[in-house]
């Protein structure tokens, strides 16, 4: 079933060779899909904060060299021998969860996001900062037609993990969001669609970020050093800043929940027990399940989510990461292999 048009050809990829924060433009062989994998021609790949943690070597595990990128939108070119129900030419999305074992205690209890031997796209498996990628078709998602390739890309992690975090926040009516990046700009739209009030917290002085939050329907926006004007029912922390945990605990009421959505966070400073007392909870969100994806893409389409993206050529991956590090982004960066380089 494999197409032989590209076999043996090389492709351009932005590769992390060592954990030094710098990607190198490399020509490497186009991978061949085996078993349940499909070969995908990458149309767009979002740049996620997790990619910064990967290139900085802040996460345990992973492989080197690695092609980062786990918000991939592309079209299926060819199929591994075991692939069923996916035809060449189909548009498909590849998320962070690349494969799971299917038989550990987590996989068997609807918690494949916690699988002991899960492998992750752009971390254990080469990802989408490239012209082509292979992915296990059983873990890919069909994407609603209303999202074009570049606008769909951030949905695949910022949207999905953001959605899982929102679910973990329960039925909170007054929802705080700390860190107003790619995930927050999607979650705000979903939360507003669900008739929640969003209180958006940015770095102090980030007027642009606060204005962006208000434009997307947030009830209030301010600095993370401020207390919100009302007591919150729950808060989601997207910024990788442990110091925000006690800050958010002080902002939520009794029974309130603080959801830590990032894969990595600086150390959480000690705090007095009384800000946790009153059945407040602190929980983390890890990865995603395929069920999350099915729910989320349908909801995003229903809610008419509009992602805000800035597209860049694949060759500008380092620039995108540098600007993301500085917080110099509105919405999300998306790399497009077909966009001419500098
Ligand atoms: Zn498992
Ligand atoms: Zn991500």
Image: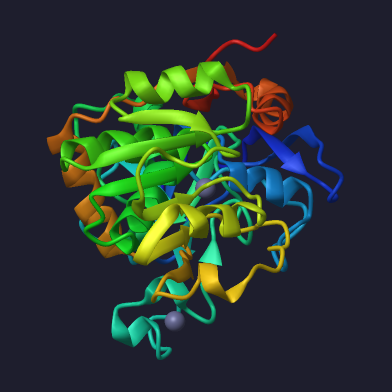
- Residue 117, placed above or below residue 54: below
Q: Position of residue 100 (x, y in %)?
A: 45, 73
- Residue 155, placed above or below residue 264: above
How is colour applied across the structure in the image?
rainbow
- Residue 83, placed above or below residue 73: below
Taking depth in this image into account, of 198 and 122 the one nearest to the observer is 198
Residue 146: quadrant of the picture: top left
Q: Residue furthest bottom?
A: 105
Q: Position of residue 84 (x, y in %)?
A: 24, 61
Taking depth in this image into account, of 197 and 179 the one nearest to the observer is 197
Q: Position of residue 161 (x, y in %)?
A: 41, 52
Residue at 29% x, 59% y: name it: 167
Tell me, yes or no, if residue 3 can be seen here: no
Residue 263: quadrant of the picture: bottom right
Q: Position of residue 247 (x, y in %)?
A: 57, 53
Residue at 70% x, 35% y: name it: 14
Residue at 25% x, 39% y: name it: 190
Residue at 72% x, 63% y: name it: 269
Q: Residue furthest left?
A: 302
- Residue 95, placed above or below residue 203: below
Tell me, yes or no, if residue 306 can be seen here: yes
Residue 154: quadrant of the picture: top left
């Amino acid at each position: 079933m494999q197409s032989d048009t590209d076999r043996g050809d090389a492709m351009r990829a932005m590769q992390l060779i060592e954990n030094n924060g710098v990607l190198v433009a490399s020509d490497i062989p186009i991978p061949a899909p085996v078993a349940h994998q499909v070969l995908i021609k990458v149309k767009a790949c979002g740049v996620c904060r997790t990619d910064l943690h990967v290139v900085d070597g802040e996460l345990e595990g992973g492989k080197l060299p690695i092609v980062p990128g786990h918000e991939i939108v592309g079209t299926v070119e060819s199929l591994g021998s075991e692939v069923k129900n996916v035809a060449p030419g189909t548009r498909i999305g590849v998320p962070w969860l690349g494969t799971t074992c299917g038989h550990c205690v987590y996989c068997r209890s609807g918690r494949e996001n916690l699988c002991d031997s899960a492998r992750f796209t752009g971390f254990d498996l080469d990802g989408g900062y490239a012209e082509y990628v292979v992915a296990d078709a059983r873990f890919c998602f069909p994407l609603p037609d209303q999202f074009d390739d570049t606008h769909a890309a951030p949905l695949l992690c910022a949207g999905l993990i953001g959605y899982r975090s929102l679910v973990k926040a329960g039925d909170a009516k007054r929802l705080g969001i700390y860190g107003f990046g790619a995930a927050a700009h999607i979650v705000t739209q979903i939360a507003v669609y669900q008739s929640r009030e969003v209180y958006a917290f940015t770095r102090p002085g980030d007027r642009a970020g606060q204005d962006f939050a208000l434009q997307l329907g947030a009830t209030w926006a301010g600095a993370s050093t401020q207390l919100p004007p009302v007591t919150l029912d729950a808060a989601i922390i997207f910024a990788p800043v442990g110091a925000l945990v006690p800050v958010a605990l002080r902002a939520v009421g009794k029974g309130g929940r603080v959801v830590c959505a990032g894969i990595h966070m600086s150390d959480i400073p000690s705090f007095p027990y009384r800000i946790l007392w009153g059945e407040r909870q602190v929980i983390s969100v890890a990865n995603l399940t395929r069920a999350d994806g099915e729910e989320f893409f349908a909801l995003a389409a229903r809610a008419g989510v509009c992602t805000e993206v800035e597209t860049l050529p694949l060759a500008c991956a380092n620039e995108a990461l540098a600007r993301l590090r500085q917080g110099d982004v509105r919405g999300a960066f998306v790399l497009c292999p077909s966009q001419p380089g500098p």
